[in-house]
Every structure is written in C-alpha cells, then in structure tokens.
C-alpha cells in the first residue's frame, strides 16, 4: 500500500506545481488508422484445436508464433488481428515499441487509440528487456512479493496513477504474471468518469515472450465520486484514498466486463512457438 499512496502523492505534487493541469503534455496516441496505414494487418489463419490447448488460436507468421485463448461465457467474440512492426514514438511518453502481435476485442468500448485499444499484445521478451532494462526482473519481483511497484506496458498516458488497486498474481497456460486496475492522469483532478484500465503483464515460462493485456472496465459504483470539489492537497489525498479503498474492496462482478471473466480469459492464454 506504501507505493500506492506514493502514486497518489505524486499527482498532488504535480497539482501544487502546475495548478491542476499539464497543458503541454499530449494526452493522445497516434490512431490505429495512422499506424496501420504503415503496417498492414497480418494474414492469419486458425490452427486446429487438436494442436493446442485453447479453443481459439491465431497464427502470426512474422513472429513465428500462434496465440491461443478461450472466450469466457458471455464474452463477445468480435476480434481484429494484426502485426505491428517497429514503431517510432509520436509523443513524449511514447516508447519505440518493437514488433508485436495483436488481438483486439472490438465489441467493447474503451481506448480507441492503437496502444490503448482493448486486447492482447505479444512481444519478444528480450526486446522488451532491451527497451526497458530490468522489465522482466521487475515483473518477477512483484510476483515474489519483493515489491508492489508494477509497470504498465504499453505505456499509458499520464504522469502518475490516481487509482491503483486489485493487484493479484495470475498465471496463463504457459506463463505467469499479474493484473491490476488503474487510472493515470497528467493533473490532480477529481474523477470525471467511472472507467478504469485492467492491465495484465506476463511472461512465458521459457522467458521468450512478453504478454500484455489491456481492457477498459466500468466501475459504476464510483459514480458518486464524479466531479467533487477539492480545494486543498489534503482533500485530494483523502478523496483518492477513499476511491482506491472502494475499488480495492469491490468484487469482480461489480465491474463491466466482469473481472472474473477477464481473469478467465487471461488464464486461458497460450503462446505456441512454431
């Protein structure tokens, strides 16, 4: 909880220095249309289920892998798949992302930009570690309970986390990782909506592939916190401590999509190297 409180204090410092907004900081990423115009969607084809342990498997020839997963009960089966080649940063908080395979769940509202869109992304772990030195070590440190300092990859826009809760370890079929809920912001303002980000960070057992999953989830029980007037840093900190406590204690079924369903989807993922 110490690091989560520090995550709350950071935006308070930003509030005092910037007056509640970082006007020069960009808040959008390049659109999927702009990025996909440069890298065409990969031609994919299903792999017979007898060759794997998942109900749905999509092959990405450019990376020499197939990504399998099962749909939880009631989960929409509308998807879009593509390969993204090396990406050049378009904003100060961007990273030069390496090649990655993507499976987007298009029926759910959420991040419409390429790097915040709902879905699974698979990277080569060695390329992630080269991009952010110690990324895998940090992941294992969280799983070993040596620290609760966790990262978001791809990087989400914002100077600090306002909500940071529900961190739990979560294994997939041939790997391990953790998931958590958060919101990030460039300014210290009260909630303007009830949408949070569910993020998963994991690595295969052979440490060859890094798996990231992003899904926007709605927390309707936070509606009463929207637009509250905060006049001092102390009020801000108390406000977000209360909000975080509400998110931390909520059950999976209080979110939409349900955290139970999202955890089931993550648990079913398998990365098959050709």
Image (spheres, rainbow, N blue to C red):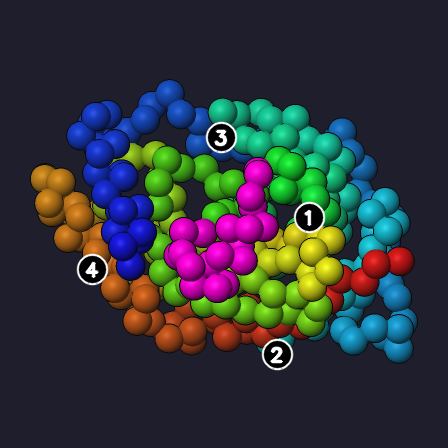
Residue 27 sits in which quadrant? Answer: top left
Whether the magenta-drawn stretch holds residue 42 is answered as: no
**Mark in the foreground, 4 or 2:** 4
Q: Which residue is at 89% across, 77% downward? A: 50
**Mark in the foreground, 4 or 1:** 1
Q: Is residue 118 visible?
A: no
What crowding class fits label 3: few (fewer than 14 Cα within 10 Å), some (14-19), or many (20 or more)? some
Q: Closer to the camera, 106 or 258? A: 258
Provide residue 239's location: percent of width, then percent of height: 18, 53
* Residue tagged 4: 242
Quarter of the picture containing the N terminus is: bottom left
* Residue tagged 2: 73
The mark that comes first in sequence, 4 or 2, is 2
The mark that comes first in sequence, 2 or 1, is 2
* Cβ–Cβ under 8 Å for marks 4 and 1: no
* Cβ–Cβ under 8 Å for marks 2 and 1: no
Provide residue 19's location: percent of width, then percent of height: 20, 27
Q: Which residue is at 39% across, 57% downward? A: 148
Q: Which dot marks residue 125?
A: 1
* Residue tagged 3: 93
Instruction: From the viewer's perspective, tell me whether residue 48 is left or right of residue 68.
Output: right
The mark that comes first in sequence, 2 or 3, is 2
Provide residue 99's location: percent of width, then percent of height: 74, 39
The mark that comes first in sequence, 4 or 3, is 3
The span shown in magenta is 132-150
């Amino acid at each position: 909880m110490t690091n989560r409180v520090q995550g709350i204090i950071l935006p308070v410092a930003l509030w005092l220095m910037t007056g509640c907004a970082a006007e020069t900081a960009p808040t959008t990423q390049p659109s999927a249309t702009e990025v996909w115009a440069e890298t065409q969607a990969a031609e994919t084809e299903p792999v017979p289920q007898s060759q794997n342990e998942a109900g749905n498997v999509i092959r990405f020839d450019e990376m020499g892998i197939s990504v399998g997963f099962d749909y939880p009960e009631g989960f929409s089966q509308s998807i879009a798949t593509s390969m993204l080649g090396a990406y050049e940063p378009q904003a100060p908080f961007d990273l030069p992302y390496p090649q990655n395979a993507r499976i987007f769940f298009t029926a759910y509202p959420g991040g419409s930009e390429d790097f915040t869109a709902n879905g699974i992304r698979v990277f080569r772990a060695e390329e992630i570690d080269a991009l952010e030195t110690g990324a895998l070590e940090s992941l294992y440190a969280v799983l070993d309970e040596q620290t609760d300092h966790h990262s978001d990859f791809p990087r989400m826009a914002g100077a600090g986390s306002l909500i940071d809760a529900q961190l739990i370890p979560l294994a997939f079929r041939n790997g391990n990782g953790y998931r958590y809920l958060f919101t990030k912001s460039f300014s210290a303002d009260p909630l303007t909506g009830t949408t949070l980000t569910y993020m998963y960070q994991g690595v295969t057992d052979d440490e060859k592939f890094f798996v990231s999953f992003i899904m926007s989830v709605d927390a309707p029980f936070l509606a009463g916190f929207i637009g509250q007037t905060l006049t001092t840093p102390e009020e801000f900190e108390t406000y977000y401590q209360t909000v975080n406590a509400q998110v931390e204690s909520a059950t999976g079924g209080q979110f939409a999509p349900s955290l139970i369903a999202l955890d089931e989807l993550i648990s079913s993922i398998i990365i098959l190297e050709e």
